């Protein structure tokens, strides 16, 4: 028997000026991706220098979730978008679609925060 989708939880923090971090947990699919895009759009409008999207606690990443992240990348302007994709199955979604060649992926939150 399949499990129902996990609720999406989004948490935003500003560990320092110009650096926004979104922690995503649950399932990122066609039902929940609009929530993520809504938040990312709001944060991009604030033009932080860096926006980190931490997918460490994401249980499922569907094509709609990938599309929301790609849309954020396309609309980022001068904001540097960094995505934490540490789980093998989450990272694989980026590699099989070729998005690992387009988006800046990091193996951990620490690595994403330490860069530049």
Image (cartoon, grey):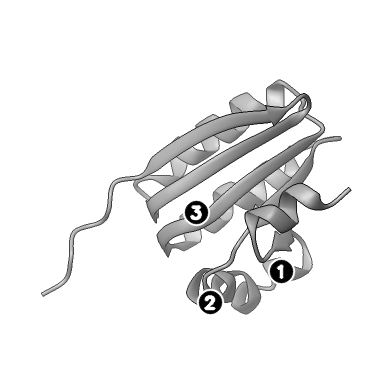
Q: Which badge, 1 or 2, is on the more N-terminal residue? A: 2
Residue identifier under label 1? 100
**Is residue 89 toward the left or the right of residue 91 in the image?**
left
Task: Give coordinates of residue 31: x percent, y percent.
Answer: 34, 47
Residue identifier under label 3? 65
Task: Give coordinates of residue 3: x percent, y percent.
Answer: 18, 65
Q: Quadrant of residue 9?
A: top left
Residue identifier under label 2? 88
The residue at 48%/54% (across/down) is 64
Determine the residue located farthest toward the left in the rendered image.
1
* Structural distance between the alpha carbons of marks 3 and 1: 14 Å
**Is residue 106 toward the left or the right of residue 58 in the image?**
right
* Structural distance between the alpha carbons of marks 1 and 2: 13 Å
Q: Which badge, 2 or 3, is on the more N-terminal residue? A: 3
Q: Nearer the viewer, mark 2 or mark 3?
A: 2
| Count of labels in the image | 3
Mark 1 residue element:
helix
* Structural distance between the alpha carbons of marks 2 and 3: 16 Å
Mark 3 residue element:
helix
Q: Quadrant of residue 2?
A: bottom left
- In the rendered image, the vertical position of residue 49 relative to residue 94, given as above or below: above
Task: Give coordinates of residue 49: x percent, y percent.
Answer: 82, 32
């Amino acid at each position: 028997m399949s499990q129902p989708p996990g609720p999406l939880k989004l948490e935003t923090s500003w560990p320092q000026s110009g650096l926004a971090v979104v922690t995503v947990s649950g399932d990122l699919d066609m039902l929940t991706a609009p929530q993520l895009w809504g938040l990312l759009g709001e944060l991009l409008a604030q033009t932080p220098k860096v926006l980190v999207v931490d997918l460490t606690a994401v249980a499922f990443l569907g094509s709609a979730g990938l599309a929301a992240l790609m849309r954020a990348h396309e609309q980022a302007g001068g904001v540097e978008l960094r995505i934490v994709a540490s789980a093998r199955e989450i990272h694989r979604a980026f590699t099989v679609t070729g998005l690992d060649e387009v988006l800046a992926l990091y193996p951990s939150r620490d690595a994403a925060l330490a860069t530049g």
